[in-house]
Image (cartoon, rainbow, N blue to C red):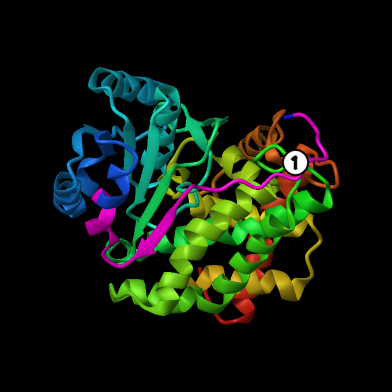
Amino acid sequence: MEATNEKVFISPARYVQGEGVTARAGHYISALGKTALLIADDVVWKIAGKELSASLEGEGVSFERAVFEGEASNREIDRLVELGRKQQAKVIIGFGGGKTIDTAKGVAEKLGAACAILPTTASTDAPTSALSVIYSDDGEFESYRFYSKNPDLVLVDTGIICKAPPRFLASGIADAMGTWVEARAAIRANANNMAGGKATLLGATIGQKCEEILFEHAMLAYQANQAQIVTPSFEAVVEANTLLSGLGFESGGLAAAHAIHNGFTALHGEIHNLTHGEKVAYGTLAQLILDQTPQAELEEYLDLYLALGLPVTLKALKLDQASEEDLYRVAEAALKEGESSHNLAYELTPRQIVHAIKAVDVHARAFMEKVGLSE
């Protein structure tokens, strides 16, 4: 991405959030086109497919459902592009989690079709952005793929999301907690954001507000999710996880936290069973250490992450048995050319990243001992 002095802010055309808004999906999607390819996995379809189908049919939108096969890979996008082309789909609907959403965006871009995103969890900030995280068929991070525009519609039904496992909400909170940590670092370094320019005042302000809301409401929202109820705090955190984090990371910028996450995907083993947000949580703590964050501030993040059951030790990250070589593989992957780790005001070496990963574990265990928690 070329250096520029232009400030750039981008966003989806329309964002709709509320309990039961799936019933209005047909109303919004029909304005984009009357023929749709609907991408969803079997689990999501069983949860809310009937309701979405009724809404689309009620507004005269004909659709074909394509089963998402589990990985946001080039092969999966190409497979679904062929289905959409045969159907002459005018709208691509991504209905599900982050990888389904990233795949739908890739399909829509290739077909030149409108894009409607309906997340069923608040576990990532993928829904609003004009990019996809592309993985190999084996789940290893490969690249970011950038698109010409953001989704035309993002429709977030908090009635569906409150029934998802609380682990997904916690993962989304972790992903969103990295937003301001990374954006402020990228802004300090005068680095480009994910939209290809410098952060606007609005982009920076959104990132700050995202973190503020999460520190205030994360636990209340998590408890509401455990009870499967929608409360004002739950609505606020869903919006922070999805809209504020999405706009904040894209128009603010990424830095070391997501690069370290991407490095973790280079490893095989149990770490692959962790969510995107759980790995980002650890990467965020590592970046805070690299940024020379004071102990009291670092412990605010540790306190919240532990309350949400997020991994803050190497054992919880499933890397307590990792070799030095494994950790250097993570660090080297995080420092690849084009990675967001280069959006810092200082240069990093693989050794510094390895030491930061180890330091998270040391500081987290010391904090847990201080507050009377055990691993």
Across the whole image, how many numbered discs are drawn on residues?
Answer: 1
Chief SS of the magenta region? loop
Residue 153 lies, with reference to residue 243, above or below; the image says above
Q: Which residue does the image show at 26% across and 57% down from the upper left?
A: 24
According to the image, label 1 marks what residue? 192
Please report the residue visible at 79 percent of the width from the left and 57 percent of the height from the top. 291
Q: Is residue 52 magenta?
A: no
Whether residue 3 is in magenta: the answer is yes
Estimate the x, y position of residue 368 in percent, counting from the top left.
Answer: 59, 74
Where is residue 279 shown, x and y percent of the image? 53, 50
Q: Is residue 164 above or below residue 258?
A: below
Q: Is residue 286 left or right of residue 223?
A: right
The residue shown at (72%, 28%) is 337
Which residue occupies the foreground of this view, 263 or 181?
181
Kindly tell me whether residue 287 is visible in this rendering: no
**Residue 4 x %, y %:** 81, 35
Left or right: residue 134 compared with residue 365? left
Q: Is residue 348 above or below residue 21?
A: above
**Which image quarter holds the N terminus?**
top right
Residue, far right: 346
The residue nearer to you, when weighing 66 against 61, is: 61
Report the magenta residues as a range.
2-26
Q: Can residue 119 be seen at all in this image of the molecule?
A: yes
Residue 235 drawn at (x, y percent): 41, 71
> In the figure, residue 67 lies in which quadrant?
top left
Residue at 71% from the left image edge and 45% from the top image edge: 354
Give the SS element for disc 1.
loop
| Residue type at numbered disc 1 | Asn
Local crowd size for mark 1, using a 10 Å CA cut-off: few (<14), some (14–19), many (≥20): many
The residue nearer to you, when weighing 96 against 82, is 82
